[in-house]
Image (spheres, rainbow, N blue to C red):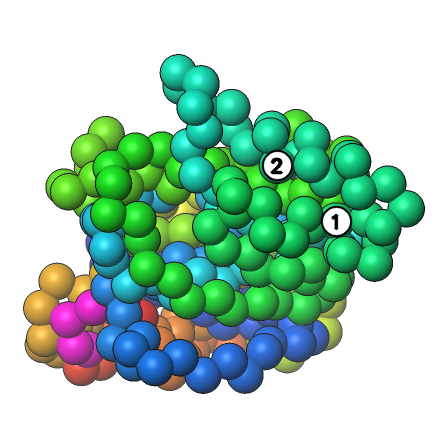
Amino acid sequence: MKNSLTLSTAAPLFSLIIFVFTGIQAQADKPPKGFEKIDREIVISTLEAKMKYNIGSFSVKPNAKIKLVLKNLDSLPHNLILCTPGKKKGGDKGKEVIDAVLKLGDKGVEQNWEPKGHPRILVSSGMVQPKEESTIFFKAPNKEGSYPYICTFPGHYQLMNGVMRVSKSGNPTEKLPVIRDLLSYTHLGSFKTLADLRKTKAVNVEEEKKGVISLQHAALKKNARDNYGIVWEGWLDVPRDGKYTFTYDTDDGGSVAIGGKEIITRNYVGPAGKPSKGSIKLKKGRV
């Protein structure tokens, strides 16, 4: 693979959190009283120019303390409003809230397209401007069921929606992968160093739905298989305290970071075949 820069790892447990979100203005929200220790952190991103959340569903246990971060990578404003299930069988995906938004009329802009005080609204991220993010803390409902979340900006609801499932098992329908909320960012160009990649903007952002690294991305299908770079970012669920070793091989250079600490750096152009290793001590939980 000539003049390419990729990020990958042979280890089954990893989190790639390098380069991504450069330029994102993060809110310095401190946990409110009672949320110093949380049960689950959920990070949901908007997909640029696709009018979609990167995560269509997630599961939590009843009464779990949740930290939810909405990262808006798009060029349009978006929000995330979590709703009650609704009275209809199977729910209405929050349409009742959308109907209330439409009734706001001229006041919609003033209220950021959110019907304040609506009985179906559980929590809201507020309207998040492009390249910014919002963090909210809340306690999951004690009643099991499917709770829809939606973007209420006009015209976004049909595509921007998802479901939070509340279940005593925490995940009743699927076996969650070790890597969660994995995104890939494709960059095109002839990169000689990691610094070259950091200077460019991703041309494509996709969700890795199976939680594993893949090179099957739209941006690469339309271009030559050379002169590109990919950044993967996700969350790693650590099963127990201990020292973990990660193995990494790529053609050409790349880097692996865990919990914000870079443990492997291959800052050169060259063939694969000589794996690099890096170790780090991790505590049980999410990094």
Q: Determine if residue 74 is in view.
A: no
**Does the magenta portion include 19?**
no
Q: Which mark is residue 278?
A: none
Q: In this view, does 89 lie above or below 127?
A: above
Magenta-highlighted residues: 282-286
Q: How crowded is mark 1: few (under 14 residues within 10 Å), some or many (20 or more)?
A: many
**Along the horizontal axis of the image, is 256 left or right of 237?**
right
Q: Determine if residue 148 is in view.
A: yes
Residue 57 in the image: state x and y as whole percent: 41, 38
Q: Write down the residue under mark 1.
A: 113
Among the 4 quarters of the image, the one containing residue 134? bottom right
Q: Residue 97 carries which label?
A: 2
Q: Of the residues shown, which amino acid type is indicated by label 2?
A: Val
| Residue at disc 1, secondary structure | loop
Among the 4 quarters of the image, the one containing residue 39? bottom left
Residue 189 in the image: state x and y as whole percent: 73, 59
How far apart are the alpha carbons under marks 2 and 1? 10 Å
Residue found at x 9% / y 75% = 241
